[in-house]
Image: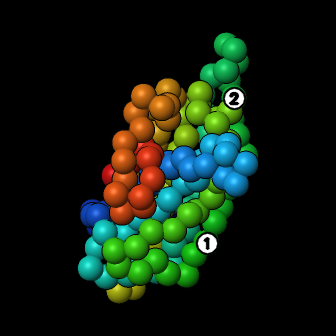
Amino acid sequence: MKKDINFPEVKNITVAIVRKKNELGEYIWDVYLMNSNNHPIENILVVSHGYGQSNGEQVKTSVLRHFFEKLDSHSSMVTESIDPSVFILNNEFGVTFYINGEMYFKKFTFVSGSITEEYLRPIPVLRMEGILHS
């Protein structure tokens, strides 16, 4: 079981929720995985879901799973798009990956209310605004 595995500490891996304008001038939101290490990460599995309350009722979103072979050092990639309607929920991203054959895992949770224009900050490496979680 995952709770019985001692994962090494995850360093320099970040998840960002970023907004950008599409060709119609409307904002769209994407989830980025960023690797600031001097080495690539491989066999990446990103598992995401939302949970919390909406209108006084418990809500859970579908679980999404995405696999990526490799993310080079000092690079980033879009893992999925995210709909603003789920920003009222806690949005959790579990990221599992390998470095030199050793497995790493980290959970990134954007709590309810943390994905708002108020918290947007420039993310220079992406040249966009977003919310970072490391």
Horizontal and vertical percent position of residue 43: 52, 79
Label annotation for residue 67 = 1
Decide if residue 81 is on the left or right side of residue 134: right
CA distance for labels 1 and 2: 25 Å
Vertical order, 129 against 40 (above or below)? above
Vertical order, 55 against 7 (above or below)? above
Q: Secondary structure at mark 1?
A: strand
Q: Which quarter of the picture shows residue 54? A: top right
Query: 101 and 113: which one is in front?
Result: 113
Q: Which quarter of the picture shows residue 39? A: bottom left
Q: Residue furthest top?
A: 56
Identity, as a three-letter code, of the amino acid under mark 2 = Val
According to the image, label 2 marks what residue?
A: 59
Classify mark 2: residues with Cα within 10 Å, few (<14), some (14-19) or many (20+).
few
Horizontal and vertical percent position of residue 36: 31, 69
What residue is at 34 percent from the left and 74 percent from the top? 74
Label annotation for residue 121 = none
Q: Earlier in the sequence, mark 1 or mark 2?
A: 2
Horizontal and vertical percent position of residue 70: 49, 81
What residue is at 66 percent from the left and 52 percent from the top? 22
Q: Secondary structure at mark 2?
A: strand
| Residue 34 visible somewhere in the drawing | yes
Identity, as a three-letter code, of the amino acid under mark 1 = Phe
Decide if residue 120 is on the left or right side of residue 88: left
